[in-house]
Amino acid sequence: MLAVQLLGWGSAPELRDIPVPEPTGEQLLLEVTAAGLCRSDLSVSDSPAGRFDYPLPLTLGHEVAGRVVAAGPDADGDTVGSSVVVHGVWSCRICRNCQRGRENYCLALQPVDGRLAVIGNGLGAPGGLAEYMVVPHGGVLVDTGSLAPELAAPLADAGATVHHAVSGQADLLDSDAVVLIVGVGGLGHLAVRLVSLRGAGHVVAVDPREAARQSATTMGATAVYSSLAEAASATRDLGGVDVVFDFVGGDDTMAAGLATLVPGGRLVVVGGAGGSVSVAKNRGIAAGWQVSAPFWGSRADLVEVVALAESGELLPEVTTRPLDEAIDAYARLRAGEDAGRTVLLP
Ligand code: NAD
Ligand code: ZN
């Protein structure tokens, strides 16, 4: 089968022909129907050896929709035939965070000797940028019914991650709220929508790309800007920002975001550009500041975004391409040439 594999750290992924996996034990085999490309894939590919505790070659793809086509001998075969999306956090299911339904903070998925641990498909385990993929058990699947695969796939990461990040700020998202969304790509455009759905009065979005700003407007932004300086100035006129969602995560965006906050305001850093920001009490940052870095989403977050998509309230904007154009599609993602989420179809 065709698969998109990372063969060496710091190199571009390649198209390869590999055997179709066979499900063993509790595993289920999926025929992949759609898989999204995430900027995190570029972070993984670009990394030097030693940052991730992942075996190579690694089939990428952590945002996967598929159809269950076979079950291992100990698996529940009832799901065979169903259309699903994969929760890509393959957690231990027994630690205290898993018991709390916070699988995305599973204690078994912590770094080992500073190296990032295997999280799940495409992030350490074979992923879904391939024609077939195995999952460890049916507990990581969420039924998607008749939802189109290209709309289901982006919910696995972009949708669930944004749902987790936004629902953590629900108490501030009222009609007076001023929200600043930095970076309106695969994740950010869904954040604009979810924040608007929660009823936030002012949803200010910033992105240097024209297509991204159009997408922000479509998703419900009340104002869009091409630079953070302009957006910051506009939010000052609104009295300052309650919540900044930073989908870039660079030194400049984090510093600028923090500076816009009102007392009790929050900087929520989702982007992984490697930036840092310094915080301290009584050093010029509005009182009661909170800075957080949410990671992915729980299975419940994924269930909720699937329901929102089925009801038509949260429909990702997607650019679809065939799987065999993966290498070019990654180059286009890096250059910011496609709108919304790029989704590959095997
Ligand atoms: P993307 O490339 O689709 O979107 C990023 C957007 O940011 C683009 O539209 C780009 O034009 C815009 N941008 C770049 N620099 C900017 C700036 N200075 N100001 C405003 N906008 C700017 O990427 P994506 O797939 O949506 O991922 C976004 C980030 O989130 C990545 O860093 C990714 O690694 C990270 N991520 C984090 C999690 C998590 O669990 N925390 C999960 C998935 C992705
Ligand atoms: Zn756990």
Image (spheres, rainbow, N blue to C red):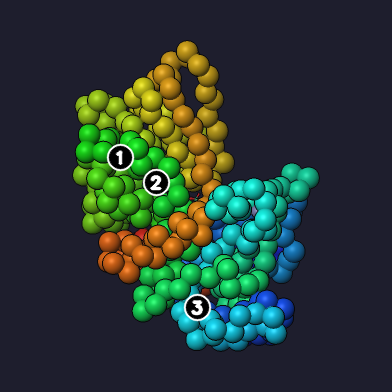
Q: Is residue 158 visible?
A: no
Q: Residues within 10 Å of mark 1 (few under 14, many from 20)?
A: many
Q: Position of residue 175 (x, y in %)?
A: 21, 38
17 displayed left or right of 141: right
Task: State the separation of the CA atoms marked 2 and 1.
Answer: 9 Å
Which mark's residue is nearer the viewer, 3 or 1?
Answer: 1
Asked whether disc 2 touches disc 1, contact meaning CB atoms under 8 Å apart, the reply is yes
Q: Is residue 95 visible?
A: yes
Q: Nearer the viewer, residue 307 or 217?
A: 307
Q: Residues within 10 Å of mark 2 (few under 14, many from 20)?
A: many
Q: Quadrant of residue 229?
A: top left
Work out which quarter of the rendered image holds the N terminus and state it: bottom right
252, above or below 108, in the image: above
Q: Amino acid at mark 3?
A: Gly
Mark 3 = which residue? 66
In this view, the residue farthest toward the right is 113
Asked whether disc 3 touches disc 2, contact meaning CB atoms under 8 Å apart, the reply is no
Q: Amino acid at mark 2?
A: Val
Q: Secondary structure at mark 2?
A: helix
92 displayed left or right of 168: right
Q: Position of residue 324 (x, y in %)?
A: 52, 79
For marks 3 and 2, the one nearer the N-term is 3
Q: Position of residue 91 (x, y in %)?
A: 64, 58
The residue located at (26%, 55%) in the rendering is 219
Mark 2 = which residue? 166
The residue located at (60%, 52%) in the rendering is 99
> Of the numbered discs in the image, which one, if any, rests on residue 126?
none
Q: Amino acid at mark 1?
A: Leu
229, above or below 86, in the image: above
Q: Secondary structure at mark 1?
A: loop
Q: Secondary structure at mark 3?
A: strand
Mark 1 = which residue? 173
